[in-house]
Image: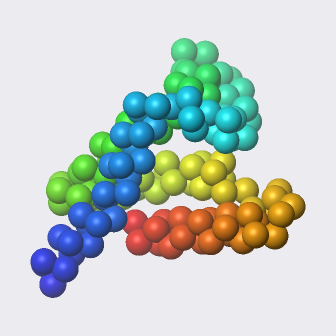
Amino acid sequence: MRPVRAAARALLGAIFVVNGARSVANPQSYVPKAKRVTDRVGPLLERADPRLPTEARTLVQLNGVAQLAGGLLLASGHFTRPAAAVLAGTLIPTTVAGHPFWSVEDPAERRGHEVHFMKNLAVLGGL
C-alpha cells in the first residue's frame, strides 16, 4: 500500500504546488475573484489584529504560499496531516471565491463552475 499512498500524495499535492506558485508569482490575476471573499474577511482580520494583512493581493499571495508549502510537504510525505489541514483551509476560500455557481446566470458557465466546485469538494475529501 505504501507506493500507492506515495503516488496519491504526490498527485494530490501537485495541484497545490502549481496553483500556489501561480498565486505567489502573479497574484493580480486572482484578485478580482478573491475580492468576493477578502472584502468580507478583511474587516474580521483587522478587528482580530490590526497588524494582519487585509489587502486582497497580499491575502492571495499568503494563500499561495500556504498552498505551495503544504503541497510540497504533502507530495514529499512530510508532515502529511498538518499539510492536509493547511491545504483544506486554503481550499475553502479558494473554492468559494473561484467557483460561485450560485451567482452565475448563463447555464453553461454555471455548469462549469458547479463541476469545479464539486471537484474541489472531492479534493477536500481526499485531504
Image position of 114 with respect to 25: above or below: below
Image location (x, y in percent) of residue 89: 49, 51
Figure quadrant of residue 46: top right
- In this figure, which colouring scheme has been used for the structure? rainbow
Side of 6 where 19 appears, left or right: right
Instruction: Name the residue rendered at 61%, 22% in the picture.
Output: 55
Q: Which residue lies furthest to the left in this view?
A: 3
Question: Which of the 4 quarters of the picture holds residue 39?
Answer: top right
- Indicate left or right for 44 with 84 as reference: right
Which quadrant, please, contains the C terminus?
bottom left
Task: Point out residue 74 in the picture as x, y percentages from the top left corner.
Answer: 26, 57
For this rendering, which residue is in front, 27 or 2? Answer: 27
Q: Which residue is drawn at 55% across and 21% down?
A: 53
The residue shown at (71%, 27%) is 43
Q: Which is nearer the eye, 44 or 25?
A: 25
Quadrant of residue 69 within the rendered picture: top left
At a point 24% along the width and 64% down the height, the residue shown is 10
- The residue closer to the viewer here, 117 or 82, is 117
State how many labels appear: 0
Can you name the residue that lies furthest to the bottom here? 1
On the question of residue 73 being in view, the answer is yes
- Pick whichever, 11 or 42, lies toward us: 11
- Above or below: residue 71 compared with residue 116: above
Examine the rendered structure and indicate whether residue 67 appears above or below residue 84.
above
Left or right relative to 49: residue 123: left
Whole-percent x, y for residue 98 in the image: 63, 51
- Location of the N terminus by quadrant is bottom left
